[in-house]
Image: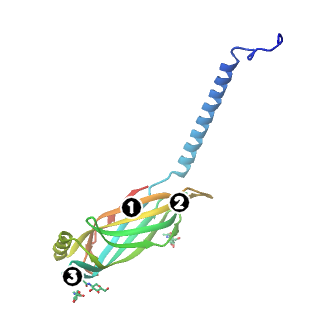
Amino acid sequence: MANAKPATQNPSGRPRLIRLIAIVLLALIVLVGLTVLIIWLTIKPKKLVYSIDDGSIHNYNLSNANHLNATYNFILRAYNPNKKVSVYYDKVDIVVMYDDDTLSRGTIDPFHQPKRNATRFKLNLASHDVPLRDDVAREIKTERSSGRVEMTVKLKARIRFKVGAWKSRHYHMKVSCAPIMVHFSTSSKGFQRTICDVDI
Ligand SMILES: *[C@@H]1O[C@H](CO)[C@@H](O)[C@H](O)[C@H]1NC(C)=O
Ligand SMILES: *[C@@H]1O[C@H](CO)[C@@H](O)[C@H](O)[C@H]1NC(C)=O
Ligand SMILES: *[C@@H]1O[C@H](CO)[C@@H](O)[C@H](O)[C@H]1NC(C)=O
């Protein structure tokens, strides 16, 4: 009772402890920040680059009831400019669009893209009896008479990055290639290469 010790012997002990914890925390934050900065500078991540290098339409047939049959050939170029980062494409969905209407859907098989690698994919897609809105069908007919039609190709991909032995979590990537001037013929001379927007 009489010899019970006071809770704190030194009244300034608690503030000193708090100050110590604050200094350690601050040092940790600076250390982690520096580590992240150094890793970032070593890897120097660069954006992936996509383009449509060629495109044409074949077997085009638009019925009176505005049902579309056609096949589309696109060359998609995927470029990974990174020296230290390779990319896993675990799932890639493709849509071909005219205005806001989807003409065709497809996929690219999962693949692993090495560092500093450019890969060209031949996309062979088709519309089978796709119903079009009246105004869309009219626009396509008008553009058809000029020999080419303005289309959009979009990709949605689930990707992971690999640096050394470390693999990142999954990211959703959206790629939009527009406007693609697609010709109604096999001769693709004069095709205007289209650089795509990439959003990760
Ligand atoms: C388009 O399809 C219709 C119905 O299938 C057919 O009668 C017509 O010959 C086709 N036109 C062309 C140019 O292939
Ligand atoms: C489209 O192709 C289907 C068969 O795949 C056929 O039944 C249909 O008549 C074709 N339509 C046109 C407009 O050619
Ligand atoms: C890019 O990577 C693919 C798949 O690994 C390979 O087949 C191709 O030869 C590579 N291209 C270049 C230019 O290194």
The residue sitting at 35% across, 74% down in the picture is: 74
According to the picture, the residue beneath numbered tag 3 turns out to be 63
Q: Is mark 3 within 8 Å of ligand 2?
A: yes
Horizontal and vertical percent for residue 91?
Answer: 48, 67
Name the secondary structure under disc 1.
strand
According to the picture, the residue beneath numbered tag 1 turns out to be 175
The C terminus sits in image quarter:
bottom left
Badge 3: residue crowd in 10 Å (few <14, some 14–19, many ≥20): few
As measured in the structure, the alpha-carbon distance from the residue carrying label 2 to the one carrying label 3 is 43 Å
Q: Amino acid at mark 1?
A: Val
Contact, CB < 8 Å: mark 2 with mark 3?
no
As measured in the structure, the alpha-carbon distance from the residue carrying label 1 to the one carrying label 3 is 32 Å
**Of callouts 2 and 3, which one flags the residue occurring earlier in the amino acid sequence?**
3
Badge 2: residue crowd in 10 Å (few <14, some 14–19, many ≥20): some
Q: Amino acid at mark 2?
A: Arg
Q: Is mark 1 within 8 Å of ligand 3?
A: no
- For residue 160, which numbered disc appears in the image? 2
Q: Amino acid at mark 3?
A: Ser
The N terminus sits in image quarter:
top right
* Quadrant assignment, res 77: bottom left
Name the secondary structure under disc 3.
loop
